[in-house]
Image (cartoon, helix red, strand yellow):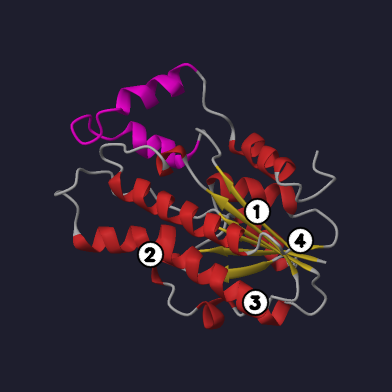
Amino acid sequence: MKLIIITGINRGLGEAFFNLLISKKDCLIVGVSRKITQVQKELLEKEKFVFIQLDLSNLKNPSIALNIESYLGNVTEVIYINNAATIHPINKIGGLKDNEIQNLMQLNTISPLLITNYLFQVASDKKMTVINISSGAADLPIVGWSLYCASKAANEMFYKTLEAQEKENENVKVVNIDPGVMNSGMQKLIRDTDEYIFPRVKDFIKLKEEHKLLSTSEVAKRIIVESNLLNDIT
């Protein structure tokens, strides 16, 4: 049995992961999100997955909030897909509010680091796969995206260090992956930003106009295939 933990399942790439994986045999999906879609509500009523309602910008103690230990009984592999993230606020340095900085870094970076550390404490006897959804912003300073860039860069270094730590452990796999530009709510937020705050906004408007944004479903499928998570993704 594979235990697959996905953060941010109610929209975008997280929802696409959920849709692709929910019907797979010998997989228990644990969705971590503030809310779920109507389809997910109907599946939850049929006990098709586990839903942990949680605002990751407020996560303090993953052992209490997640209680993953209670699902590990018949599990041989734990898969953690670190997907949930926000790009808000988009603003220049100096215009950011203190609470905005704290909330973004908590959601994008502190919470996934806490969750990963926790999983390696409680599931050290299991096969473990960690997929960190990264971004080109981890390596590229983008005016207006300072917090997003910083959070993605911090995550990449953390998971690269984890990979180095576990390089002799064949039961642990760590994947940092940039999904590319997708047709998502985050992209709409980017396109709606004032050019003074985000000078590259026209580039992202052009991507939409030229139909160069990938669907979240095809990106999720590619990531699952490239990470060798499952053999029967179609």
Label 1 neighbourhood size at 10 Å, few (<14), some (14-19), many (20+)? few
The residue identified by callout 3 is 68
Mark toward the start of the polypeptide (2 vs 4)? 2
Return the residue nearer the eye: 203 or 155: 155
Return the residue nearer the eye: 7 or 226: 226
Q: Amino acid at mark 2?
A: Gln
Q: Quadrant of the N terminus?
A: bottom right
Callout 2 secondary element:
helix
Q: Amino acid at mark 1?
A: Val
Return the residue nearer the eye: 191 or 122: 122
Mark toward the start of the polypeptide (3 vs 2)? 3
Label 4 neighbourhood size at 10 Å, few (<14), some (14-19), many (20+)? few
The residue identified by callout 2 is 106
Which residue is rendered at x = 31% and y = 34% of the image?
192
Between the C-alphas of marks 3 and 2, the distance is: 20 Å
Residue 104 percent across, percent down from the top left: 34, 58
Mark toward the start of the polypeptide (2 vs 1)? 1
Q: Amino acid at mark 4?
A: Glu
The residue identified by callout 4 is 170
Between the C-alphas of marks 2 and 4, the distance is: 31 Å
**Marking on residue 39:** 1
Callout 3 secondary element:
helix
Residue 51 percent across, percent down from the top left: 62, 68
The magenta span reads 184-210
Residue 28 percent across, percent down from the top left: 75, 65
Q: Amino acid at mark 3?
A: Ile
Q: Are marks 3 and 2 in contact (CB under 8 Å)?
A: no
